[in-house]
Image: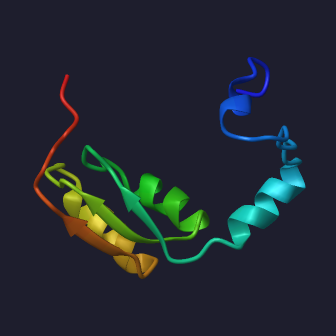
Amino acid sequence: VLQDGAWQQFFTEQPLVFTREEKKAWIQQQHDVALGSDAFFPFGDNIERAYKSGVKYVVQPGGSIRDDHVIDTCDKYDIVMVCNGVRLFHH
């Protein structure tokens, strides 16, 4: 985005690129983040990664054969998950 100049459509000044340390500090400040997915989560590692980014609430369609494992992972990190039954991702 920065290289092709697309940022100019949205900003009057070019945003500075975060250093690795700045990115880590910014992510650590995030709390109570909501995450929505258009397809189910097949593995708990997705939830573990979301937790590291401050996710506290998840909505997803559900329907994976591993839903129980994903639910257990949410419980482990005290993340609220709702399965809405609406799958928007299609092949």
- Residue reaching furthest to the left: 85
Residue 42, how many percent across, how many down? 30, 47
Q: Residue at x 42, y 78 (%)?
A: 76
Up/down of 70 relative to 46, above or below: below
Q: Residue at x 80, y 65 (%)?
A: 25
- Which of the 4 image quadrants contains residue 39? top left
Instruction: Tell me how the rendering is colored.
Output: rainbow
Residue 2, how many percent across, how many down? 77, 28
Residue 69, how many percent across, how many down? 29, 62
Q: Residue at x 10, y 55 (%)?
A: 85
Left or right of 74 on screen, residue 66: left
Left or right of 34 on screen, residue 59: left
Up/down of 76 relative to 69, above or below: below
Q: How many marks?
A: 0
**The C terminus sits in image quarter:** top left
Q: Nearer the viewer, residue 66 or 21?
A: 21
- Which of the 4 image quadrants contains residue 90? top left
Q: Nearer the viewer, residue 87 or 73?
A: 87
Q: Nearer the viewer, residue 20 or 46?
A: 20
**The N terminus sits in image quarter:** top right
Up/down of 76 relative to 88, above or below: below
Q: Residue at x 42, y 82 (%)?
A: 78
- Residue reaching furthest to the top: 4
Residue 40, how many percent across, how many down? 25, 48
